Amino acid sequence: MLNGRRIAVIMPAYNAARTLEATYAEIPKDIVDTIILGDDFSSDHTVQLSRQLGIETVLHSENRGYGANQKTCYLSALNRGADIVIMLHPDYQYSPKLIRAMASMIAEADFDVVLASRILGIGALAGGMPLYKYISNRLLTLFQNLLCGHKLSEYHTGYRAWSREVLESLPLLANSDDFIFDNQMLAQCIYRGYRVGEISCPTKYFAEASSINFRRSVTYGLGVLKTSLEFRLTRLGVMSAPILRDTPDKRLSSLQQVQAKHV
């Protein structure tokens, strides 16, 4: 807890057994009230290890996708009274030690959203980010900043902190269940005028760290372009993108109601 606000760390996982324990060990448990792992039907022993470590573990009965896993994790954190929710990949690519700084940026009421950026500073390539990913990251970010009228160093980090207000207000159920979910969520925040801050984050690329392949990277890149264009056209009044509409029945509370019917 920081400044009277409860903190939850969520870890959307898929076959993360090789790196989960190292990630968990560095989470600052003196300030984190709840740690939740969402398992998207892993085929390794991620679930067993998570339970051995004492992590609250939420399971999908089938592989539903990275975005769907996040929806489940965020809802679980809100149901447990979290005021600040930090998404941390359990692949040990991002440093869990930044949780304290990221939570502080929200707990002190300066920001609604905080991103741990791999691009701020000079650590991305030194940390092993493939050159093609670095270049595509920079180009996509430039394009999105221009179309969204915003200024971020990157839109593609998987290490993010959110206030409860943001998670409860966004129509997250309108977003994809795939990797583009992350980008759509940021577009929704910018569209609604939430305050987005960034912090420099060292990152590590190694064999055990999760990474989407080239084909899925291309699919993601095309999704970013589509999201950016829809944002711009919606702002101009030319269209109304579904992910940007204020649709109460697409909020996480609706997912909770659906789940309750199946209990």
Image (cartoon, rainbow, N blue to C red):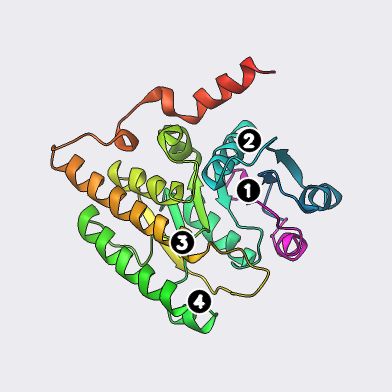
Q: Secondary structure at mark 4?
A: loop
Q: Are the residues flagged by discs 3 and 4 in contact, CB closer than 8 Å?
A: no
> Residue, x 47% and y 33% (percent of image)?
168
The amino acid type found where label 4 is placed reads Met
Q: Position of residue 234 (x, y in %)?
A: 20, 40
Q: Amino acid at mark 2?
A: Ser
| Residue ID at (44%, 79%) | 131
Numbered range of the magenta stretch? 1-29
186 magenta-colored:
no
- The residue under label 4 is 129
Callout 1 amino acid: Ile
Task: Indicate whether 128 appears above or below 88.
Answer: below
Q: Nearer the viewer, residue 153 or 173?
A: 173
How far, Cα to Cα, is label 3 from label 2? 32 Å
Most extreme residue toward the right, as rendered? 52
Specify whether residue 196 is in view.
Answer: yes
Residue 91 location (% of width, % of height): 65, 63
Q: Which residue is mark 1?
A: 10
